[in-house]
Amino acid sequence: MPDTDPTRFPAPTDAALRDAGWQPGRWDIQQAEEWADALRAHVTPSGHQHTVFPAAVEVWAEFGGLRIAGPGPGRQIAPATVRIDPLAGVHLARTLSDLGRALDTEISPLGEEGDGQAVLAIDVTGRVYGIDHTGDWYLGRNFAEALTALITGMEPTRLTPA
C-alpha cells in the first residue's frame, strides 16, 4: 500500500521525485509483480536465485520506472541519478546472495545509480545498499533515507574494505 505522508521526504527529495513523475499514492503493483516473476525465474549457471520480499515489492510498486535526478550540487560527493528497475541487477543473484549472507539478511535488486555505475539493492527490513566495482556500500535504513543521500550527494558508508 502506498504511503501518502506529505512529510515523508525532505523538500529536495520530494521535489526530485515529483520532477521524475512521482506523486503520493502512485502504485503500480502489476509492474512490481512482473519484475518479481522475472527475478524469481532467473537462475545463474551455479544455481543462485533472487529472493523477493515485501520491502522490495513495495518500493518497486511505488517508485518503479522512475529516473530521479539530484536537485543541485552534492553536499560531500557528486549527486547521483537513481533509476528504479530491479532488472538492472538481474545478473547479480550470486553477488546479492553473498552480501545478504555476510549481513545475515536477504537482499533483492532495486535499481541502479547513474548509468549503471552501481546496482542498488534492498534487504528484508528496507535497508538500501549500493554495489559497484569498488565495493559494497550502505546507503540508508530505508528507501527515503537512501534516496535522499544519493541525490543530495551524501557520502555513503563502505561495507567492504578498500
Image: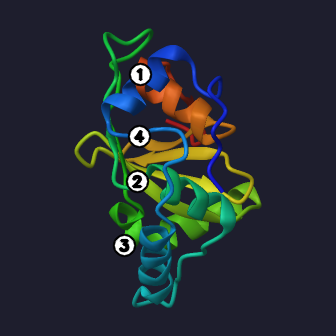
Tell me if mark 2 has few (under 14), some (14-19) or many (20+) residues whose alpha carbon lies within 10 angstroms of its own: many
Q: Which-is-in-front pick, marks 4 and 2? A: 4
Q: Which mark is residue 15?
A: 1
Mark 3 and mark 4 residues within 8 Å of each other at the beta carbon: no
Is the residue under label 4 in contact with that under label 1 (CB below 8 Å)?
A: no
Label 4 Cα crowd, 10 Å radius (few <14 / some 14-19 / many 20+): many
Residue at x 51%, y 56% (from the top left corner):
27
In the picture, measured across the screen, residue 150 lies left or right of residue 52, that is left
Q: Is residue 153 visible?
A: no
Question: Where 139 falls versus 125 (above or below)?
Answer: above
Amino acid found under the numbered disc labelled 2: Gly
- Please tell me which of labels 3 and 1 falls first in the chain: 1
Name the residue tied to disc 3: 91
- Amino acid type at circle 4 is Trp
Question: Residues under labels 1 and 4: Cα distance?
Answer: 9 Å
Q: CA distance from mark 1 to mark 2?
A: 20 Å
The type of residue carrying mark 3 is His
Label at residue 111 = 2
What is the quadrant of residue 100 in the picture?
bottom right
Q: Residue at x 49, y 61 (%)?
A: 109
Q: Residues within 10 Å of mark 1 (few under 14, many from 20)?
A: some
Q: In which quadrant is the N terminus drawn? A: bottom right
What label does residue 22 carry, if any?
A: 4
Give the secondary structure at mark 1. Answer: helix
- Mark 1 or 2, nearer chain start: 1
Relative to 115, residue 156 above or below? above
Mark nearer the viewer, 1 or 2: 1
How far across and down, in percent of the image, does residue 150 sit?
A: 45, 29
Tell me residue 116's x, y (percent).
26, 49
Residue depth check, mark 3 versus mark 2: number of the one nearer the observer = 2
